[in-house]
Amino acid sequence: MISEFAQPRPGRYVLFDVDGTLIDAVANQRRVWEMWAGRYRLDADEVHRVALRTRPAETFAQVAPDRDPAECLAVLHELEDEDVRSGVYGAFDGASELLGTLPVASWALVTSNYEHRVRGRFARTNLPLPRVIVDAAAVQEGKPSPVPYLLAAEQLGARPEDCLVIEDAPSGVEAGLRAGMTVWGVNTEVPAAGVHRHFGSLREAVPDILAFAFLP
């Protein structure tokens, strides 16, 4: 794959989304929302359908407008934290090899989740962690705003044009494009609008991501 004599390409950085890109958490997210819906005696399928395309606050406003949003969020956080402790997680094929090969200072995680959950999921799946993690608490504007990816680049000491974003979700793709970065999509059958390259799986993208990061 990458020769032991290959050197990191100076000024090249890779910024990864987490859920859906490196870690397969689809079943976990559905289970959490089903349990949340059960707490409020709501239709689980409808709640999950809304949650897939909106942020939590918007989901609460649509499916439980008569409930206290702060209480709804506290319940969701409780369920998500428990899922990190007891749920079954899997890393996408290629994730361990990819992250283990990249120099630790050359990549970052940019997630709409919270850092303590990311660390818990990475521990459960034996994935290495980078020095830079930009989570939901680090920014006031989440994806599709470019702010999370621009903050990650700043913390890495990188120029946006030298960053490669790896994403699975349209909102993340939009965020990377608005940040002025190269964006590749993975783990979807249909390319998100605007991606520079698309791969059906993370595994398919591994050689090209490493080629981006290393000198031949």
Image (cartoon, rainbow, N blue to C red):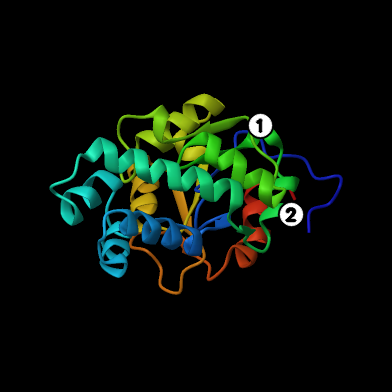
Q: Disc 2 or 1, which lies upstream in sequence?
A: 2
Q: CA distance from mark 2 to mark 1?
A: 16 Å
Q: Amino acid at mark 2?
A: Glu
Query: Residue 191 location, x and y as percent?
Result: 41, 68
Contact check, label 2 and label 1, Cβ < 8 Å: no
- Residue at 31 percent across and 29 percent down: it is 140
Query: Residue 129 location, x and y as percent?
Result: 66, 38
Residue 96 is tagged as none
Query: Residue 100 location, x and y as percent?
Result: 74, 46
Disc 1: CA contacts within 10 A as few (<14), some (14-19) or many (>=20): few
Name the foreground residue: 51 vs 169. Answer: 51
Query: Residue 199 location, x and y as percent?
Result: 53, 67
Helix, strand or loop under label 2:
helix
Q: Which residue is mark 2?
A: 97
- 45 up-or-down from 58: above or below: below
- Residue extending furthest bottom? 189
In the image, taking residue 123 as reference, residue 49 lies left or right, namely left
Q: Which residue is mark 1?
A: 105
In the image, taking residue 48 as reference, residue 135 lies left or right, namely right
Disc 2: CA contacts within 10 A as few (<14), some (14-19) or many (>=20): few
- Residue at 40 percent across and 35 percent down: it is 136
Figure quadrant of residue 109:
top right
Name the foreground residue: 120 vs 162. Answer: 120
Q: Amino acid at mark 1?
A: Ala
Name the foreground residue: 97 vs 129. Answer: 129
- Residue at 69 percent across and 47 percent down: it is 127
